[in-house]
Image (cartoon, rainbow, N blue to C red):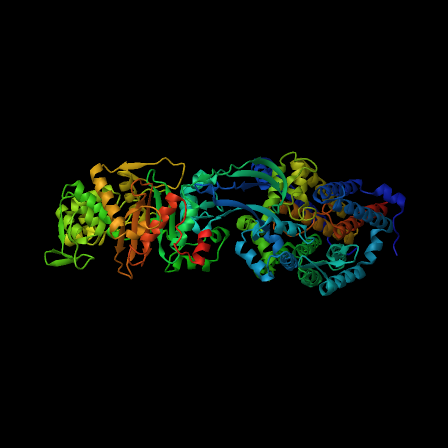
């Protein structure tokens, strides 16, 4: 043995090593004591949470149907193909999975798949969606493919579809993924990220009722999130079905009538405020919104000058124009400023101070009382009586009729319109209210703005003897109304005036479609282009059932464009049949048969 | 050529405590591998393969006892040169597995030369330090050169874990061989100064592993995932464990590589603190007997060889146990005798056979 080694020193060193070794055992045992005995509860908890996954089971939403039971919003079972990034990122898998998908009719390229994974990636073991909206047939084919492997799995999803699509878009609304803001306010009532929520229309207003209750399934998974077994299952409760007051055939008819116009048609049952038809043109299809549209398509929906997503029937505020004259008439009669025997001479203009306000009839109407003034839509009569009345009393009546307040319809996005008046003008424009403003106000021009639905319920109130209903689309909802407190005499006068309009006045054309209509034309001055055409009326004139309002933006005159729309719609609602032109062209027949 | 040991001597002088510790650790290891591995037709895939490897290793163990460690040491230089050659060859044509070239694919099994290389390296270290004691700079530099080359070829595989094992073995041998504490202190300081540049030489995944060690929750679903899951497995085992085959963490594949790297976590989950303490005591017994053998023999080469083997087993055991508690970075080193892996098991059994032979033959020398 080498003499260079100090044997005693080597022995000492070996003892030192022995000591070091036993020291490490001491440390290791101490650490084990800490993790396995002291902190055991924490780790036992972690271990059990680790392998449990709670899966939300979304129930199908309640089905929405029209008053006759025609489906307006239903659910379809579709399937998503999911996978875990940890599997999908393996380059060996990418091409194989793409080939598998392509072979089964799902276009997918390697780069596309990689981009999908990158976009949804949050953790290697958190599932992402590879393809969505597949049918059962597609999924069955895919799963039976010999190359379908455990890197992919299928999950069923309920998708909302709207069979009537564009015809009911503004009434039904649509569902979409819950936003961060929505989640904040709704987390406490059971919503979770990724849930679908009604965004608009009936879907939005009756969300709570339609949503149902999510169930949950607790499963045991392995580290890759793959299901091993079920621990517990709590059934979801499907949402409540809903029946609407809407009549789908009326919606389709309204779409047909408004085919070439931007505008809206609203029809209301005068006895309970039920909305039978509420259509806004142009419309849009809600289906792509729930199934996922590109941001480009979305921008198109929002940015178009046509604004298809705007519900013109309740969100569009227009000058009510001559349709407002019933409010003026009611105000002056109520406040006893005039009676039926009070006449105003119309020379074609009205002078207030040094300003001259023209009647639409340049050569004048001659001597007019309230009924004749309604019939002829004589501006000068209303200029005069409103000036006698004064703006404050006028505003009081307008307020009573619900001008400037939401009707309370069970839909989203309703506009209040503008009631205007001296206080409002001071606040908004910082100017005083002049006599000229009252003159303009009397014929529904100037600052006053109303939605078609607001106008409709005023006409319904005149037709039903003074009950201002809260419009509703939910068939189950109890009718609500406010009594206007207008005497029967005044109602009679207004009704007679409106009957005269269609019998011998400006709205004659409205009564040519099979039912006697009482109503009022309107032509709203539009600073941005052609005048908007209004018609508001109800039928049958002597025993009213429905009130209908139509507006056509840039439709020029109410008498020729919207009058026939309202006439035809009222005829359809009262008689149940569409008006057929006396000498039907082949095309008209086809469309009538639809 | 020196004589070997006759069977009678082997039977009479064998250190049965060391043999028992080895067999017990292998047995418990097999149980854990059995529990951690996927089942195929009612048979645990890795569990049964590990038994076959155990049988093969036993043949080597007995053969080495009969041949005698002195005859084995005769082949030190060629064995070491062959090991170096294989490691370099591996870099050239190595089978790529999980980004690291650590295996030769021999068709029926994958051979990992860095494992058997530990035995060759221990023998070579003992040889050099016995002839040229690391008590002066020249001899120390010789050992450094020899070890440096070996460690580099393993480090570039890249196999950080194994290269650290080699380093620890070298360090333990020169410490035992009588290197002065002054030089030792200088070496430690130099080593510490080397750490920052070394860190940047590491592969990104190695760097992440080290960073994750300091805070596993940096990336709980990614690289830190393993550490967290392993700690949960071990911690949830509690005092008595969840019972054999009842570990949830291992069974549900939360633990990565449960049959190799994280075998101790699997065991700890199923057998709890009591089981862990038994395993640690068995390792302590084994290491105590190895160092005792080093003290017992008069052959300085054999002494230093025993130290190298003790350092190897001690480091891998400590690293593996600490890793499963999340107290050390994930290196992928097997727990000796315990983890699944043919090359590793065979290598450690051969190394222990030589130690046993040293024990047996030192009796022959005495009497």
Q: Quadrant of the C terminus of chain B?
A: top right
Instruction: Report whether residue B194 is seen.
Output: yes
Q: How many marks?
A: 0
Report x, y in % for residue A399.
23, 43
**Front residue (pair A78, A341):** A341
Q: Quadrant of the N terminus of chain B?
A: bottom right
Given the current orientation, which residue lies at the most extreme front position? A583
The foreground one among A258 and B276 is A258
Residue at the location (39% across, 59% down)?
A303
Give the side of residue B75 with respect to residue A553, left or right.
right
Q: Who's the residue at 28% across and 47% down the image?
A: A519
Left or right of B329, for residue A413: left
Q: Is residue A526 left or right of residue A571?
A: left
Which one is in front, A550 or B241? A550
Q: Residue lying farthest left?
A: A353
Residue located farthest toward the bottom when viewing the structure as drawn: B92
Which of A353 and B231 lies nearest the eye of the viewer? A353
Say if residue A22 shows up in the picture: no
| Residue drawn at 46 percent across, 55 percent down | A590
Please determine whether, in this image, residue B274 is positioned above or below residue A87: above
Q: What percent of the width, then of the height, locates residue B186?
A: 61, 58
Left or right of residue A109, residue A311 in this image: left
Percent position of residue A554, x then y? 31, 59
- Coordinates of residue A334 in the picture (x, y in percent): 18, 40
């Amino acid at each position: 043995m080498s003499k260079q080694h100090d044997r005693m020193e080597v022995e000492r060193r070996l003892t030192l090593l022995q000591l070091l070794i036993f020291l490490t055992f001491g440390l290791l045992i101490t650490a084990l004591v800490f993790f396995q005995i002291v902190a055991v509860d924490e780790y036992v908890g972690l271990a059990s949470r680790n392998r449990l996954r709670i899966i939300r089971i979304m129930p199908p939403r309640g089905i929405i149907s029209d008053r006759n039971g025609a489906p307006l919003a239903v659910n379809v079972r579709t399937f998503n193909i999911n996978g875990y990034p940890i599997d999908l990122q393996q380059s060996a898998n990418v091409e194989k999975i793409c080939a598998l998908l392509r072979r089964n009719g799902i276009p997918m390229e390697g780069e596309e798949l990689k981009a999908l994974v990158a976009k949804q990636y949050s953790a290697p073991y958190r599932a992402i969606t590879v393809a969505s909206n597949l049918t059962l047939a597609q999924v069955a084919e895919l799963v039976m493919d010999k190359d379908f492997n455990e890197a992919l799995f299928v999950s069923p999803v309920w998708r909302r579809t709207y069979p009537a699509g564009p015809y009911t878009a503004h009434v039904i609304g649509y569902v979409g993924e819950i936003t961060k803001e929505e989640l904040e306010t709704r987390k406490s009532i059971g919503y979770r990220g990724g849930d679908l929520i009604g965004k608009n229309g009936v879907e939005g207003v009756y969300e709570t009722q339609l949503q149902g209750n999510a169930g949950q399934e607790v499963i045991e998974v392995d580290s890759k999130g793959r299901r091993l077994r079920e621990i517990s299952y709590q059934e979801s409760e499907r949402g409540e079905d809903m029946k609407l007051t809407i009549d789908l055939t009326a919606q389709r008819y309204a779409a047909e009538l408004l085919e070439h116009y931007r505008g809206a048609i609203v029809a209301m049952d005068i006895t309970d405020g039920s909305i039978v038809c509420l259509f806004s043109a142009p419309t849009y299809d809600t289906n792509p919104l729930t199934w996922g549209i590109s941001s480009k398509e979305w921008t198109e929906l929002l940015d178009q000058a046509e604004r298809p997503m705007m519900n013109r029937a309740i969100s569009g505020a227009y000058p009510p124009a001559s349709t407002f004259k019933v409010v003026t008439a009611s105000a002056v009669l109520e406040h006893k400023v005039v009676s039926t025997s009070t006449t105003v001479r119309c020379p074609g203009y009205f002078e207030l101070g040094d300003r001259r306000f023209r009647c639409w009839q340049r050569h004048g109407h001659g001597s007019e009382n309230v009924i004749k003034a309604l019939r002829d839509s004589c501006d000068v009569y209303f200029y005069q009586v409103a000036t006698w009345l004064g703006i404050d009393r006028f505003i009081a009546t307008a307020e009573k009729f619900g001008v400037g307040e939401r009707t309370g319809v069970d839909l989203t996005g309703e506009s209040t319109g503008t009631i205007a008046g001296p206080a409002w003008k001071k606040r908004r424009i910082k100017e005083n209210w002049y006599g000229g403003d009252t003159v303009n106000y009397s014929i529904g021009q100037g600052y006053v703005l109303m939605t078609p639905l607001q106008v409709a319920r005023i006409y319904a109130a005149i037709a039903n003897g003074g009950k201002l209903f809260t419009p509703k689309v939910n068939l189950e909802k109890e009718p609500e109304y406010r009594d206007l407190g207008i005497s029967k005499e005044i109602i009679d006068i207004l009704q007679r005036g409106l009957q005269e309009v269609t019998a011998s006045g400006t709205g004659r054309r409205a009564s040519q479609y099979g039912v006697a209509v009482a109503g009022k034309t309107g032509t709203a001055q539009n600073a941005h282009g052609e005048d908007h055409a209004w018609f508001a009326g109800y039928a049958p004139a002597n025993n009213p059932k429905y009130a209908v309002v139509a507006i056509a933006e840039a439709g020029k005159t109410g008498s020729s464009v919207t009058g026939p729309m309202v006439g035809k719609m009222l005829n359809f609602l009262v008689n149940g049949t569409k008006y057929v032109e006396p000498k039907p062209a082949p095309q008209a027949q086809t469309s009538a048969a639809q | 050529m020196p004589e070997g040991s006759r069977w009678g001597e082997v039977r009479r002088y064998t250190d049965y405590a060391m043999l028992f510790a080895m067999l017990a650790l292998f047995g418990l290891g097999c149980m854990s591998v059995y529990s951690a591995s996927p089942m195929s037709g009612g048979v645990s895939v890795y569990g049964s393969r590990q038994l076959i490897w155990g049988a093969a290793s036993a043949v080597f163990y007995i053969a080495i006892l009969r041949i005698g460690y002195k005859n084995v040491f005769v082949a030190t230089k060629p064995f070491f040169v062959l090991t170096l050659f294989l490691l370099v060859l591996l870099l050239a044509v190595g089978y790529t597995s999980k980004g690291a070239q650590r295996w030769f694919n021999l068709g029926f099994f994958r051979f990992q030369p860095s494992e058997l290389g530990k035995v060759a390296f221990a023998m070579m270290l003992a040889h050099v330090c016995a002839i040229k004691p690391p008590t002066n700079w020249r001899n120390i530099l010789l050992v450094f050169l020899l070890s440096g080359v070996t460690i580099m070829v393993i480090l570039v595989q890249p196999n950080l874990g194994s290269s650290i094992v080699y380093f620890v073995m070298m360090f333990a041998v020169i410490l035992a061989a009588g290197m002065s504490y002054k030089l030792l202190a200088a070496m430690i300081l130099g080593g510490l100064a080397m750490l920052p540049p070394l860190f940047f030489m590491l592969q990104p995944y190695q760097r992440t592993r080290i960073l994750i060690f300091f805070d596993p929750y940096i990336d709980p679903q990614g690289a830190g995932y393993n550490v967290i899951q392993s700690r949960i497995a071990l911690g949830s085992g509690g005092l008595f464990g969840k019972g054999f085959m009842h570990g949830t963490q291992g069974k549900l594949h939360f633990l990565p590589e449960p049959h190799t790297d994280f075998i101790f976590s699997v065991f700890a989950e199923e057998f709890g603190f009591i089981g862990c303490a038994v395993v640690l005591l068995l390792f302590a017994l084994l290491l105590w007997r190895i160092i005792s053998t080093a003290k017992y023999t008069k052959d300085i080469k054999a002494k230093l060889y025993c130290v190298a083997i003790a350092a190897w087993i001690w480091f891998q055991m400590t690293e593996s146990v600490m890793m499963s508690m999340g107290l050390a970075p994930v290196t992928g080193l097997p727990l000796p005798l315990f983890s699944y892996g043919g090359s590793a098991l065979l290598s450690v059994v051969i190394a222990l056979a030589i130690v046993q032979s040293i024990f047996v033959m030192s009796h022959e020398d005495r009497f």
